[in-house]
Structures are given as C-alpha cells and as structure tokens.
Image (cartoon, helix red, strand yellow):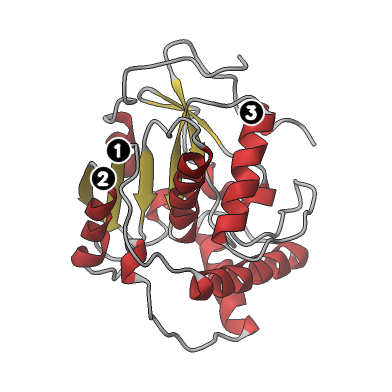
C-alpha cells in the first residue's frame, strides 16, 4: 500500500498537516471536493485501517477491526509515529470526530505532543452521548444510508463497497454504544466544533465541547453530508484557524 502521506501532495512550504479521518460508511470519495491545501493546512487522510468502522474501501488493504474507539485511536497514533508524523491537526465528522478526540486523549496518555488543533464536525460532545438508546437499524436501512451518501457525493458504489459500508456503520454503532466519557478532561490543544443547522443536533450538545478546553463553536448552514458535498463554508472556517504556535513543518519531510 502506498504511503497515505503521498495520497494528495507532499506538504507545501508554509503549511501544516491536517489529517482528515474518514467517516464510517462514506468511502474514499468523501474528501474529493476538498483542495490539497486549506488556508495554512495541507490536507491528507490516513488509511482506512483507522476508519472508525474498521472496513477498508476497495482502494486499500483490509485490516481487522478493533473493538472500540480507544483501541482504534491507539492504532492511528501508532501509525502516525511509525511514519514520523509529529505536528498535525485532526478533522473528523460524526463518529470520526470522536475518534479524533480519542487520538488527542491517547497522545496525552503517552506524554506525546498534542495536536495543533482538533476540528469536530456534526458531533455532540462525548458527555451528551452517554445513555443514548436507539433502535438497532436493519442492514437494509444501513445500506440505504450508505447509498444515499454515495449518491449525494456523486458516485454509485459497487455492491462490494456498499456491503463494506454497511459493515463499517454497524461496527460504528457498536463502538458508540460502548463509548463513555464519565468526566470531561480538557485537552492540550484548541478545538473548533462545527454544528450543521439542518443535521438535527441540539446546539447545547455541540457547545458541550467547551468542557474539553479552548473551544470555538461555529454554526453553518447544511446537513450532515455538507462537509463532503458542499464544503465551502467549512473550508473557510478551517482555513481561518492558524496552527497553535504558528506554522511548523512536520517531521519526516
């Protein structure tokens, strides 16, 4: 498998790395409408082994799924360290936002440098997830969700990709049901929390990220897929946030 650091371009001079964690079930194409650079950030995405759903799209090698968010965060941190990536920010949408948060927690647990910034999109703060109960969706319902997302992003998935998306969403639901953060612990990096006005998440639930440190909350028009289908407003928000301490070239380049 080719290095994911080279999936787009090597970091441009004067940019810092923004790692975009893929959302479960939305495939490789979810960041196709993002440019290579967004303001001070060079956009890259990790391999699908770090996907919350644990299923790799057809363009990547498959890897066994882990049991929960902390384990997957540990896998992603280990992969970053193997590749010599030390200075970076994180972006995640919905369940991938929680994975990004867990990566920051894992880095703190290891005594490693904190991310430059954490961008969480379309996701309630962890303390607002505790105790939530939902009916178990059928495979057909999950397939409809995967297909709707793919069509909105301008593609029709092959049956094998559709099936992989269903497995990824099923694994995500299992991981989220088991995920609990009893007491918010402030992170060592600034956060930007994005609430999409048509997604149906309460403002209070997104504002709850303020319990985790220096947080700005931004409300944007759009739905839960707008980060991929109509990202212009989001990209402006990301581009306006400078890395903490200024731009620093990542190790390894």
What label does residue 178 carry, if any?
Answer: none
Mark 3 or mark 2, which is nearer the start of the sequence?
Answer: 3
Image coordinates for residue 246, horizontal then vertical, percent: 32, 17
Per the image, label 2 sits on a secondary structure element best described as: loop
Per the image, label 3 sits on a secondary structure element best described as: helix
Crowding at dot 2, Cα within 10 Å, few <14 / some 14-19 / many 20+, comes out as: some
Q: In which quarter of the image is residue 146?
A: bottom right
Going by the image, does 13 lie left or right of 211?
A: right
Q: Spatial distance from mark 3 to mark 1, Cα to Cα?
A: 24 Å
Q: Quadrant of residue 159?
A: bottom right
Which residue carries the number 1 mark? 190
Q: Nearer the viewer, residue 30 or 184?
A: 184
Per the image, label 1 sits on a secondary structure element best described as: loop
Mark 1 or mark 3, which is nearer the start of the sequence?
Answer: 3
Q: Which of 21 and 160 is in front in this view?
A: 21
Note whether 49 is above or below 113 in the view shown: below
Q: Spatial distance from mark 2 to mark 1, Cα to Cα?
A: 7 Å
Which residue carries the number 3 mark? 5
Residues tagged 2 and 1 counted as in contact (Cβ below 8 A): yes
The answer to whether residue 183 is seen in the rendering is: yes
Note whether 214 is above or below 210 in the view shown: above
Closer to the observer: label 2 or label 1? 2
């Amino acid at each position: 498998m080719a290095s994911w650091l080279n999936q787009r371009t090597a970091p441009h001079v004067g940019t810092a790395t923004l790692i975009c964690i893929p959302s479960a079930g939305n495939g490789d194409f979810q960041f196709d409408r993002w440019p290579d650079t967004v303001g001070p950030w060079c956009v890259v995405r990790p391999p699908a082994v770090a996907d919350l759903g644990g299923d790799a799209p057809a363009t990547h090698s498959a890897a066994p799924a882990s049991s929960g968010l902390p384990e997957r965060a540990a896998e992603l941190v280990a992969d970053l360290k193997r590749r010599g990536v030390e200075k970076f920010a994180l972006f995640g949408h919905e369940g991938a936002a929680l994975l990004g948060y867990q990566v920051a927690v894992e880095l703190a647990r290891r005594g490693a440098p904190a991310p430059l910034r954490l961008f969480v999109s379309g996701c309630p703060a962890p303390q607002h997830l505790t105790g939530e109960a939902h009916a178990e969706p059928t495979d057909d319902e999950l397939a409809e969700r995967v297909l709707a997302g793919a069509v909105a992003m301008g593609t029709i998935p092959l049956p094998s990709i559709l099936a992989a998306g269903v497995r990824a969403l099923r694994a995500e639901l299992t991981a989220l049901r088991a995920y609990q953060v009893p007491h918010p612990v402030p992170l060592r990096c600034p956060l930007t929390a994005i609430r999409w006005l048509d997604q149906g998440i309460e403002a209070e639930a997104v504002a709850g990220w303020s319990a985790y440190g220096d947080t700005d909350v931004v409300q944007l028009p759009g739905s839960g897929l707008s980060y991929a289908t109509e990202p212009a407003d989001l990209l402006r928000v990301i581009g306006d946030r400078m890395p903490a301490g200024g731009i620093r070239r990542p190790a390894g380049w």
